[in-house]
């Protein structure tokens, strides 16, 4: 009598059945149960259970030993078979490894780029507690979102609200001429900063005390790179640098270079107390937004609930409600790590990244990897009939389905890890190229290898399983009886599946190529569109030294007399630099209907120098002494928006500042003051010397280098204390489209790689088709078929698949490109031509790939092909 079995007995027997095969050890389990019952009746359940568990544990060493031995035997057998297949099928093995290696290399490069983009500003110890104060809203009906804020708001928030721990301000200083021991430098990356900056941010100092480095006025902290450039191997602490004509700053600290994965970009930090000394009114004003304010929040504070408190504090200190002045201000706290990818505000510190690009490149990496996996699946399933007898014999000899699946998955993983080794070499070669396109230095540092190796192995494992899973189950599903009798044929269902994979390949390749063409068209459109001014052959010299301003008339006169100089003008802004924006009251509008207008200050030579057309009225002229006081030129957009049919003589009143009234004396043709991302805004040009900081020199094409030397010499003769600092207008303007140019180049590279992988797969399929139809082709040739007819026969199916792929890809790429082009106010038209050209290019490549093997097979001697086995 056995009675009711205990849970311990059931668990022991279940474990024993896992360790010992009941099928191979028939009768063993019955004997154990009989002996267990005997112990149970004589010694009790506890002693019987102990005996049973002892028997179970005794089998474990033998089980482990047998498992390791037989698994090794099987793995050794599988490896031998795999390498024999590699040697026997060299072309197909090379195609598989090459495709997987290129796909994995692309994936690794893009993943390193994505990792770099996601790492921005996370190196700060308190990164999760640091926020930037930003403003959004409307100003005179014009929406705005800016990264700037007023000077005193940060410290006031810390004093008034317990949620804020500390604050720090940054303010950019314009390009500055710096002198040290007879050397001249021009620097753009200069910021004023509070002394608390080293408490909030992780900016380690290599020299100096972080607690006192920015405490005193006219103190400066420089980066290690800057110290090497100015002082070489000498100790820079205590050295004095002359900024501009008369400001002396003492170097009080040397900081490690700001990491590249940072939205901060500076070489100099100057004490903010210096700015307070030079212009206290600005730093204490609640209505001048010139600072970047960063706040460190205390643990447990909710940044989303603090916006109302910030707004109420700002309104109280401004002394008036901004809404009464046409402002609608909304304050927000922006997490530091999200600034680079999720912030595209006005007046950003640097040009930020874009999360959409991360998504785009991640998608491209996935698509290229899918292409490589499709190649493997296609070739493996197409050649499945060649291994059908192997599988059938294994099944006859007792191999179960799971073992066969493991065998072929193992072969797939061998391909994958072999490809990973090559992919790492390719990615090491490709990363410098990718870095040059993106403008970032990206690479794999040795210290990161511990974290990256598991990731790389994970990619290889994923690719091996993704590419090999379907072929493994296809091969493991063969019926032994049919295979051994020779009745195996590839099913129509499997053929349709392979055709579907080829269509997917061609769709991905076609989408990337057409997308590349559309991006290139848009970049060319932006660079070649008529802008309303002539950007070529214009040298722009900066006037960053106040001592030069009185000499501007003399410099202009001297430069105009030079052979090769066509005209010279002075201005506050140039195309590519947004002009000042301010609210005005055009004639015919009430106080509640103020209009925002862009403002440029120029002299009377501006229109002629820049090639801007005057469509009505007159230009500024020295013959009209009153022009600088109250005359303006407006653009066509302003006249249209204000509803002025005859704008001449109309008045425009300033709302802020001097509240002067301007009289329109002329209308100029619309020209693009900013990039083609933005619409042309209402604008007026005033004849004023206030704020003039640029000298634009139009030159004739020819000996530019020689003319530059002459201009520099003339400049130095008149203003010896201010070196000639210049750039070219067309280069400056086109720099706005650098992101699109990079995107176009990268799309081109990835499109070519996608086509390369697809062509590898098509070549493999063509080789396989030729191999399968060798005898058929020989018979056709004996019966009189021509080479061209046989090539067409072998290419016909591909053409059908290609046409179907284009029917799928055209709508996809059209919708995606329409969405992307919405980022531009002025954009190219998507014509049928780009689709036809891209499709023709893809067709030539694919047909060329397939036709090579088809022609080779069709040209073979029928005698040899008929003997083919």
Image (cartoon, grey):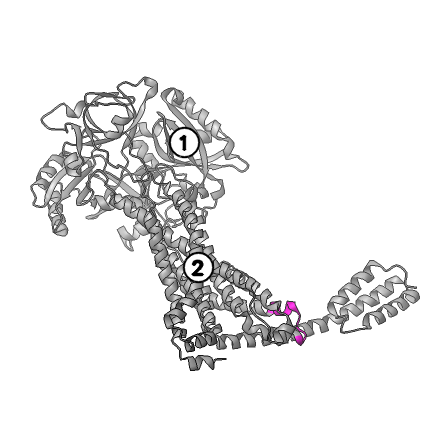
Q: Which residue is mark 2?
A: 800
2 or 1: mark nearer the eye? 2
At x 85%, y 72%, the residue is 31
| Depth check, front residue: 598 or 449 | 598
Question: Magenta stretch?
Answer: 396-406
Position of 656 with respect to 404 (left or right) is left
Q: Residues within 10 Å of mark 1 (few under 14, many from 20)?
A: some
Residue 717 - label: none
Q: Which residue is mark 1?
A: 136
Q: Are marks 2 and 1 in contact (CB under 8 Å)?
A: no
- The quadrant the N terminus occupies is bottom right
Is residue 229 at least partly visible in the picture?
yes
Residue 400 part of the magenta-drawn span: yes
Question: How far across and down, in percent of the image, does residue 272 sit?
Answer: 34, 36
Q: Earlier in the sequence, mark 2 or mark 1?
A: 1
Report, in whole angstroms, how far the alpha carbon at label 2 lies from the one at label 1. Answer: 54 Å
């Amino acid at each position: 009598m056995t009675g009711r079995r205990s849970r311990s007995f059931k668990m022991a027997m279940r474990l024993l059945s896992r360790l010992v095969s009941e099928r191979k050890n028939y009768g063993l389990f019955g004997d154990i149960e009989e002996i267990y019952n005997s112990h149970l009746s004589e010694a009790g359940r506890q002693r019987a259970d102990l005996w049973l568990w002892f028997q179970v544990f005794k089998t474990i060493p033998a089980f482990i030993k047998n498992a390791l031995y037989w698994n090794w035997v099987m793995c050794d057998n599988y490896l031998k078979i795999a390498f024999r297949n590699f040697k026997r099928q060299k072309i197909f093995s090379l195609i598989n490894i090459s495709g997987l290696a290129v796909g994995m290399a692309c994936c690794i490069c893009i993943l390193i780029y994505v990792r770099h983009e996601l790492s921005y500003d996370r190196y700060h110890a308190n990164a999760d507690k640091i926020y930037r104060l930003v403003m959004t809203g409307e100003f005179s009906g014009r929406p705005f979102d800016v990264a700037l804020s007023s000077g005193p708001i940060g410290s006031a928030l810390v004093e008034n609200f317990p949620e804020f721990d500390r604050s720090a301000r940054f303010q950019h200083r314009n390009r500055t001429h710096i002198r040290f021991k007879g050397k001249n430098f021009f620097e753009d990356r200069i910021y004023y900063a509070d002394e608390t900056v080293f408490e909030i941010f992780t900016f380690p100092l290599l020299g100096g005390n972080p607690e006192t480095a920015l405490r005193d006025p006219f103190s400066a902290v420089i980066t290690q790179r800057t110290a090497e450039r100015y002082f070489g191997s000498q100790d820079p602490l205590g050295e004095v640098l002359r900024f501009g004509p008369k400001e002396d700053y003492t170097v009080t600290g040397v900081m490690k270079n700001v990491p590249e994965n940072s939205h901060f970009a500076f070489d100099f930090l100057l004490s903010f107390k210096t700015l307070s000394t030079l212009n206290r009114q600005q730093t204490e004003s609640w209505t001048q937004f010139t600072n970047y304010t960063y706040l460190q929040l205390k643990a447990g504070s909710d940044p989303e609930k603090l916006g109302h408190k910030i707004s109420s504090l700002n309104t109280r200190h401004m002394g008036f409600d901004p809404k009464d002045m046409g402002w609608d201000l909304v304050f927000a706290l922006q997490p530091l790590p999200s600034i680079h990818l999720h912030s595209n505000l006005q007046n950003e510190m640097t040009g930020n990244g874009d999360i959409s690009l991360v998504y785009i490149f991640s998608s491209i990496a996935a698509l290229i990897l899918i292409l490589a996996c499709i190649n493997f699946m296609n070739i493996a399933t197409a050649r499945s009939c060649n291994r059908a007898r192997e599988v059938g014999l294994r099944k006859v000899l007792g191999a179960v389905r799971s073992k066969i699946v493991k065998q072929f998955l193992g072969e797939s993983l061998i391909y994958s890890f072999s490809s990973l080794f090559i992919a790492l070499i390719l990615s090491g070669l490709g990363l410098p190229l990718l870095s040059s396109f993106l403008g970032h230095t990206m690479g794999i540092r040795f210290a990161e290898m511990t974290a990256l190796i598991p990731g790389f192995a994970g990619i290889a494992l994923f690719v091996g399983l993704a590419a090999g899973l379907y072929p493994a189950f296809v091969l493991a599903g063969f019926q032994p009886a049919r295979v051994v009798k020779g009745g195996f044929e590839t099913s129509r269902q499997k053929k349709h599946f392979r055709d579907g994979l080829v269509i997917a390949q061609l769709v991905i390749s076609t989408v990337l190529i057409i997308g590349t063409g559309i991006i290139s068209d848009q970049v060319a459109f932006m660079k070649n569109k008529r802008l309303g001014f002539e950007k070529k052959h214009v040298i722009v010299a900066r006037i960053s030294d106040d001592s030069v301003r009185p000499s501007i008339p003399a410099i202009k006169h001297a430069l105009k007399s030079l052979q090769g100089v066509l005209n010279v003008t002075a201005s506050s802004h140039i195309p590519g630099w947004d002009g000042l924006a301010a609210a005005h009251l055009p004639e015919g509008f009430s106080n509640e209907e103020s209009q925002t207008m862009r403002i440029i200050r120029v002299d009377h030579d501006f229109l002629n120098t820049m090639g801007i057309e005057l469509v009505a009225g007159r230009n500024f002229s020295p013959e009209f002494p009153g022009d600088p006081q109250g005359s303006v030129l407006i653009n066509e957009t302003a006249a249209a928006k204000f509803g002025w049919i005859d704008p001449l003589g109309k008045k425009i009143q300033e709302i802020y500042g001097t509240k002067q009234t301007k009289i329109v004396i002329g209308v100029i043709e619309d020209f693009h003051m900013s990039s083609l991302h933005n619409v042309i805004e209402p604008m007026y040009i005033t004849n004023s010397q206030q704020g003039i900081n640029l000298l634009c020199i139009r030159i004739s094409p020819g000996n530019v280098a020689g003319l530059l030397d002459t201009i520099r010499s003339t400049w130095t003769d008149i203003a010896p204390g201010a070196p000639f600092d210049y750039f070219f207008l067309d280069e400056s303007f086109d720099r706005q489209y650098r992101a699109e140019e990079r995107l176009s180049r990268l799309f081109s590279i990835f499109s070519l790689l996608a086509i390369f992988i697809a062509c590898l797969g098509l070549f493999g399929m063509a080789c396989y088709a030729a191999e399968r139809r060798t005898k058929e082709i020989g018979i056709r040739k004996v019966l009189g078929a021509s080479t061209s007819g046989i090539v067409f026969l072998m290419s016909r199916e591909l053409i059908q698949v290609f046409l179907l792929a284009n029917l799928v890809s055209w709508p996809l790429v059209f919708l995606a490109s329409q969405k992307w082009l919405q980022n531009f106010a002025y954009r190219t038209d998507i014509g049928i031509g780009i689709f036809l050209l891209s499709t023709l290019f893809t067709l030539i490549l694919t047909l060329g790939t397939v036709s090579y093997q088809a022609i080779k097979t069709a040209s073979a001697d029928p005698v040899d092909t008929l003997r083919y086995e």
